[in-house]
Amino acid sequence: MINKVTTYLIFIWIVAVVTAAYPTFVQGQVICNERAAILESLDNSYGEKIAEQGLDEGSLIVITVNLQGKWSLLLTPKGRPNTFCVPITGSNWTQEENVSNGIAYNGSVLTIVQNDDGTWNMIYLDKNTGNIQNVTKGYAWERVLNLK
């Protein structure tokens, strides 16, 4: 049985890994939990369902969306395949032919550009600095839910 100190240290380690892997948009508190618990919480609290997903260097990247366009970015920290962390959420998620994007709650824009072969790029436009950054790229991108 894991004691509270060990659990806290594991949580701090997960937050450090997620922050190191995705420093571009991790600015507030990152929420991490068992995958099923995160998905259930997003569904029960906000009506969000998995809309899109893909892989980048072994991590699963997922976008959940509700009918009003509220969205969350979920990712599995490297080496923790049964965990999801939520580093960023927002509104106005839209899907076009090969592009999906939404406005983060800090006013920045997260965009995913997917190619017909399933490869994809995640781009982040930081509202405060005006910088456009390639966050990550991967393969096997698929739309699970078509919002059109």
Image (cartoon, helix red, strand yellow):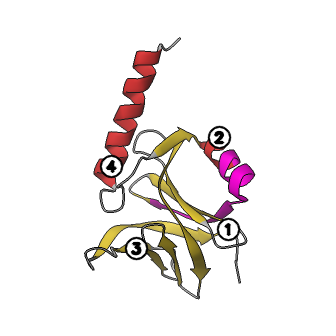
Tell me residue 94's x, y (percent): 59, 80
Q: Earlier in the sequence, mark 2 or mark 3?
A: 2
Q: Earlier in the sequence, mark 2 or mark 1?
A: 2
Crowdedness of circle 4 by 10 Å Cα count: few (<14), some, many (20+)? some
Q: Secondary structure at mark 1?
A: loop
Tell me residue 109's x, y (percent): 43, 76
Q: Earlier in the sequence, mark 2 or mark 4?
A: 4
Question: Mark 4 highlights which residue?
Answer: 19
State the CA–CA distance, disc 1 to disc 4: 27 Å
* Magenta stretch encompasses residue 82: no
Crowdedness of circle 1 by 10 Å Cα count: few (<14), some, many (20+)? few
Label 2 vs label 3, nearer the camera = 3
Q: Which amino acid type corresponds to the residue marked 4 in the rendered image? A: Thr
Label 1 vs label 4, nearer the camera = 4
Q: Earlier in the sequence, mark 3 or mark 4?
A: 4
State the CA–CA distance, disc 2 to disc 1: 19 Å
Residue at image position (40%, 73%) is 108
State the CA–CA distance, disc 2 to disc 3: 27 Å
Label 3 vs label 4, nearer the camera = 3
Question: Mark 3 highlights which residue?
Answer: 108
**Residue 81 in sight here:** no
**Range of magenta residues:** 40-55
Q: Earlier in the sequence, mark 3 or mark 1?
A: 3
**Residue 31 in sight here:** yes
Apparent side of residue 6 relative to residue 63 in the rendered image (left or right): left
Label 3 vs label 1, nearer the camera = 3
State the CA–CA distance, disc 2 to disc 4: 21 Å
Instruction: Tell me: residue 138, above or below residue 26.
Output: below
Q: Which mark is residue 37?
A: 2
Question: Mark 1 highlights which residue?
Answer: 144
Q: Which amino acid type corresponds to the residue marked 2 in the rendered image? A: Ala
Q: Secondary structure at mark 3?
A: loop
